């Protein structure tokens, strides 16, 4: 495929640290998961009450999308249907599935049950940003950058999307990792060409 | 853009183990939905379309869960006489499911072994290995549009030039996990479901699997073609559909445009029609927005219940069979129009010349999908 798309922003959250475009922007390594997610929310100085209702997977994916898009995404450039979201992970919504199973023994909780689908975090990001384009959630054993490159390029180069948020959002018990990429057609000063290789580089950021 | 054809399919459900058996049951007004008293699933009696506990999907199934056995049975049926070589490097398997092996959580201690066993990529790999697929399988899990999204993903993969043949199989097994969740939402109907009816009271759940095989090979060009597809999001609510239906309407219009069709080209709509108050109203508004309110539409939920990750596949396969047979199926459970914006709900078995069919689905997370099939 000869048409090149660009990673115009990236965000990684892993091991108590947050990175934007490859640079560390926030760290709270000693907090437990709940405390860490809350501290990232507070770092963003937002007032978004839906955040408190979300399960941990949605919180993680939603926070990563907030950091990804902040100062980097210009919503006025696109119609709502032109921005889409393609996310992948390994354990689907298992973190919340385990919590829901506990509620069945007592009183099944509809507010927990609704988060037992991994694509709900995509819905949360769409609600926040009024994104109405193509969305999908794929389950992979590990992050498959080559699949992501091929799949997103196809959507971008055939006029299905003009902008795409894609990546990996995985959370189970106390282990978590989110890496999101904003893919657009035009380069900017932060640009990396949208390739599997560049995604892998940003994906491994916490090891640097 | 390459043309893509549906070259083979299978439905494995409580009302038939092949597409032909299923279609025959539907034309005879046979439903799988019955009253169940099963304390392993619910404290109260409930209506659902379930396989008999004793039903064996495949022989020698020791290593496979019921979910995987159901997938294998359906894929086996679709591969038969299809000429598809699973080991070919231009062929790939896609699995669609909402909850996969989730029932294992109800009966087993959670540990690293269970974590691996329950993962959907584990099931997909085991099923792919059973058939000898050489490529890594994909797993699509996007709530109730998973089945349609599997077909759409298959189309995207073929058109990006990566593959020539895609086998898409979707299944879900009804467990206490799933049933109790829908009960907690008060979404389960206390009687057989009544899609689009004024007295509709919610859904029935159902078990089943559907498999379709897509191919870009020209030798299949006289058959059913996969035309325009579209996916979108309501960006409104995680568990309630849009009040206006505008977003599903947009997705339907995009699928029409991508087929180079207008509303007048559509002869049949296979709706999602879950029989919840809000879904059916939203869908009717979307169908009206797209200018399709006078096209005969049906919902198959009265026969199958809501088969979750399989629904989009099972209902697509029945639509394709309808196109081939020029036969529109009735909407079991529908008696009296219960929509603010009425659409043409078909409630008789009708012989009509059919060329093009629209299939829609919507799900939790605000997702919507539409696919158009065409008879060549």
Image (cartoon, coloured by chain):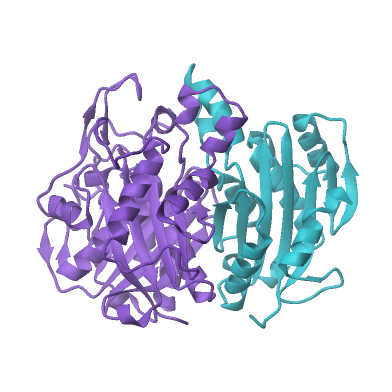
Nearest the eye: B144 or B53: B53
Q: Residue furthest top?
A: A106
- Chain A rendered in what hue? cyan
B59 above or below B18? above
Q: Residue at x 36, y 35 (%)?
A: B174
The reply to whether residue B116 is visible in this rendering is: yes
On the rendered structure, is B96 left or right of B307? right
Viewer-proximal residue among B166 and B59: B59
Q: Residue at x 26, y 45 (%)?
A: B13
Q: On screen, B246 above or below A67?
A: below
Which quadrant holds the N terminus of chain A? bottom right
**B364 sits left or right of A18 in the view:** left
* Nearest the eye: B344 or B363: B363
Q: Is residue A149 above or below residue B142?
A: below
Q: Is residue B152 left or right of residue A29?
A: left
Image location of residue B345, percent across then percent down: 22, 57
Residue B84 location, x and y as percent? 36, 67
Q: Position of residue B196 (x, y in %)?
A: 27, 49
Count of numbered circles on the image: 0
The percent position of residue B243, horizontal first and vertical second, equals: 45, 51
> For this rendering, which residue is in front, B201 or B32?
B32
Tell me if I can see residue B271 in this picture.
no
Left or right of A104: which side holds A164?
right
Q: Residue at x 37, y 60 (%)?
A: B360
Quarter where residue A23 is shown: bottom right
Q: Determine the colour of chain B.
A: purple
């Amino acid at each position: 495929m000869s048409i090149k798309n660009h990673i115009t922003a990236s965000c990684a959250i892993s091991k108590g640290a947050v990175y934007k475009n490859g640079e560390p922007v926030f760290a709270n390594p000693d907090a437990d998961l709940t405390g860490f997610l809350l501290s990232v929310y507070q770092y963003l100085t937002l007032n978004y009450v839906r955040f408190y209702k979300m399960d941990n997977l949605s919180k993680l994916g939603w926070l990563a999308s907030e950091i990804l898009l902040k100062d980097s995404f210009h919503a006025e450039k696109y119609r709502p249907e032109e921005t889409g979201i393609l996310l992948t992970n390994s354990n689907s919504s298992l973190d919340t599935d385990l919590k829901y199973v506990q509620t069945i023994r007592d009183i099944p909780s509809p507010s927990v049950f609704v988060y037992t689908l991994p694509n709900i975090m995509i819905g949360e990001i769409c609600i926040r940003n009024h994104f109405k384009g193509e969305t999908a959630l794929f389950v992979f054993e590990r992050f498959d950058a080559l699949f992501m490159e091929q799949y997103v390029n196809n959507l971008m180069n055939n006029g299905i999307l003009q902008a795409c948020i894609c990546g990996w959002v995985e959370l189970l018990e106390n282990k978590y990792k989110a890496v999101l990429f904003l893919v657009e057609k035009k380069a900017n000063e932060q640009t990396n060409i949208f390739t599997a290789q560049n995604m892998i580089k940003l994906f491994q950021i916490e090891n640097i | 853009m390459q043309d893509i054809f549906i070259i083979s399919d299978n439905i494995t459900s409580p009302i038939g183990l092949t597409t032909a058996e299923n279609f025959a049951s539907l034309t005879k007004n046979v439903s799988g939905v019955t009253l169940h008293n099963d304390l392993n699933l619910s404290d109260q009696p409930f209506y659902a379309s379930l396989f008999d506990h004793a039903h064996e999907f495949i022989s020698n199934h020791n290593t496979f869960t019921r979910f995987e056995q159901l997938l294998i049975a359906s894929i086996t049926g679709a591969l038969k006489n299809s000429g598809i070589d699973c080991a070919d490097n231009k062929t790939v398997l896609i699995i669609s499911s909402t909850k996969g092996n989730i029932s294992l959580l109800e009966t087993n201690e959670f540990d690293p072994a269970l974590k691996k066993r329950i993962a959907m990529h584990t099931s997909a790999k085991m099923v792919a290995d059973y058939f000898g697929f050489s490529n890594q399988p994909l797993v699509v899990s996007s709530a109730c549009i998973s089945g349609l999204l599997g077909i759409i993903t298959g189309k995207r993969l073929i058109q990006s030039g990566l593959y020539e043949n895609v086998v898409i199989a979707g299944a879900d097994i009804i467990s206490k996990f799933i049933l109790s969740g829908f009960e907690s939402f008060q979404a389960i109907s206390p009687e057989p479901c009544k899609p689009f009816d004024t007295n509709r009271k919610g859904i029935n759940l159902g078990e089943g699997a559907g498999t379709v095989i897509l191919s870009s090979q020209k030798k299949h060009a006289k058959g059913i073609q996969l035309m325009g597809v579209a996916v979108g999001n309501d960006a409104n609510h995680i568990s309630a559909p849009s009040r206006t239906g505008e977003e599903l309407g947009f997705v339907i219009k995009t699928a029409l445009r991508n087929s180079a069709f207008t509303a007048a080209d559509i002869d049949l709509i296979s709706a999602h029609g879950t029989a919840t108050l809000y879904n059916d109203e939203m869908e009717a508004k979307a169908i009206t927005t797209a200018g399709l309110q006078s096209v005969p539409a049906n919902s198959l939920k009265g026969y199958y219940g809501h088969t979750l990750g399989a629904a989009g596949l099972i209902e697509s396969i029945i639509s394709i069979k309808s196109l081939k047979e020029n036969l529109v199926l009735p909407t079991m459970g529908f008696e009296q129009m219960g929509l603010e914006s009425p659409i043409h709900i078909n409630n008789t078995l009708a012989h009509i010349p059919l060329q093009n069919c629209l299939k829609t689905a919507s799900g939790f997370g605000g997702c919507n999908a539409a696919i158009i099939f065409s008879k060549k």
